[in-house]
Image (cartoon, grey):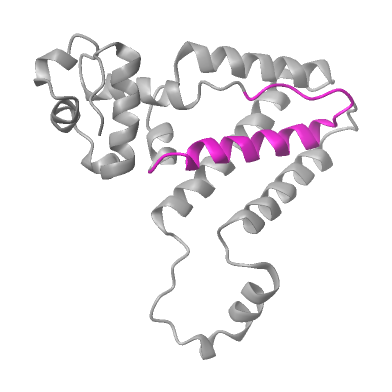
Amino acid sequence: MTRKGLAREGVVRAALELLDEVGLDGLSVRRLAAALGVQNPALYWHFRNKRELLDEMTRALLAPDMGGPEDGEPWQDWLARRAHRYRRVLLSHRDGARLVAGSDPGAGVARAFEEELRVLTGLGFTPGQALHTIASVSHYTTGFVLSEQAGGERASGLDLAEFPLLVAGVREGGTPGGDEAFTFGLRALIAGVSATLPDRRP
């Protein structure tokens, strides 16, 4: 890893690079200090402990604004686009979903979330409906990527002759992980939300 300066942002970038190399379980302040070519105490000027470092890494990962609907875009399409973008963010770093799931995203992410709630309430959702709609899509996406990054779809050692429907299902629609499976589940989730709410148009 290239040595970086000890500006707070540089430390966070270096930590994300190290995350890609060693994973969340292998990430430590000691290893990060070694990668930066400094002693451990130098990092504690910026972060009091590893938990604070992980929180800041999460905030850096989630910093890009997901944005609101485009002109004339139905809220269903916007939520789907938002979920796909969020998934790409989580997949952009090793153990990205685990990192985000276990960290405090901070006020910046909360403000962006507030704006998303404002979008849906502006379309006629109640605050509670808006909150649970966005949270459900976010939780689905995080959970899906957790499984992806953990290799949760592996089925090594199986005699596939015993599972003809499983084989047929994979041939028809792909494996339970990956783009096709994610899109299928996302569509089902958003369709379920649509079915429980009155029609809402941008």
The image shows residue 31 at horizontal and vertical percentages of 16, 33
Q: Residue at x 47, y 39 (%)?
A: 92
Which quadrant would residue 184 be assigned to in this image? bottom right
170 relative position to 41: left or right? right
Residue visible at 29% across and 40% down in the picture: 24
Residue at the farthest bottom position: 161
Q: Quadrant of the C terminus?
A: top right
Q: Identify the residue shown where x is 58% and y is 35%.
A: 86
Q: 38 left or right of 149? A: left
Task: Point out residue 148 in the picture as x, y percentages from the top left corner.
Answer: 47, 53
- Magenta span has 78? yes
| Residue 33 horizontal side relative to residue 166, left or right | left
| Residue span colored magenta | 66-94
- Residue 95, image x, y percentages: 38, 43
Residue nearest the viewer, comparing 85 with 197: 85
Residue at image point 84% right, 20% down: 124
Which quarter of the rendering shows the N terminus?
A: top left
Q: In the depicted view, which residue is nearer to us: 194 or 50?
A: 50
Quadrant in the rendering for residue 115:
top right
Q: Is residue 6 left or right of residue 66?
A: left
Any part of residue 32 in sight = yes
Instruction: Determine if the magenta segment contains residue 25.
Output: no
Q: Residue furthest front?
A: 2
Percent x, y of residue 38: 12, 20
Taking 28 as reference, is 94 above or below it? Answer: below
Where is residue 23, by image quadrant? top left
Q: Is residue 139 visible?
A: no
